Amino acid sequence: MSGQHAVCAVEDVPHESAREFQVGDQSVVVVRFDGQFHAYLNWCPHLGIELNFMPDQFMDDDGRFLVCANHGALFEPENGHCLSGPCSGEALTAVPLEVRDDTVWVGPVGAPA
Ligand code: FES
């Protein structure tokens, strides 16, 4: 359990949406998609900067992909793979995530790859 951080309750992240949480010195994106939770560093593999301009704005209009606001790269919520954009073929850095007792736990959180 060491290195895990309780970031929110399950109901704090609506279906087909994502929110950011500060864990230590890293921003972590928790996404709820297709009934599953996933977590990634808020770190675009293209330039190594945060994905979003606006708080908690990570999903495209259809709620189908995570978007990098900088250059419009699209990432699969299930595995972080970049499907289109300048970092196509790369992936977001996954963060371990566990749901226990209606609480979302993430970590340990490492540095960006
Ligand atoms: S920094 Fe993310 S697509 Fe350019």
Image (cartoon, helix red, strand yellow):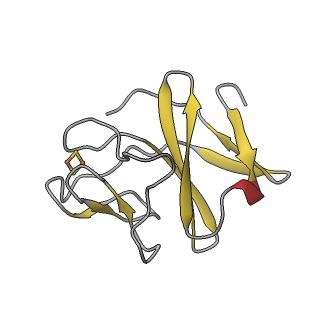
**Quadrant containing the C terminus in the rendered view:** top left
Q: Is residue 108 above or below residue 38?
A: above
| Residue, far bottom | 62
In this image, 61 relative to 46: left or right? right
Residue 61 figure quarter: bottom left
x and y percentages locating residue 38 in the rendered image: 55, 55
Query: In this rendering, would 50 be left or right of 37?
Result: left
Give the side of residue 35 with respect to residue 102, left or right.
left
Image mark count: 0
Q: Residue furthest left?
A: 86
Can you name the residue that lies furthest to the front here?
A: 54
Q: Residue furthest top?
A: 25
* Residue at left offset 68%, top offset 32%: 5
Q: Position of residue 106 (x, y in %)?
A: 62, 40
Lateral position of residue 107 relative to residue 51, left or right:
right
Q: Residue at x 56, y 50 (%)?
A: 19
Residue at the spot 40% in from the left edge and 26% down from the top edge? 111
Could you tell me which residue is drawn at 26 percent across and 35 percent down? 48
Percent from the top left, x then y, of residue 6?
Answer: 73, 37
Task: Determine whether 39 is above or below 11 in the image.
Answer: above
Q: Give the quadrant of the N terminus.
A: top right
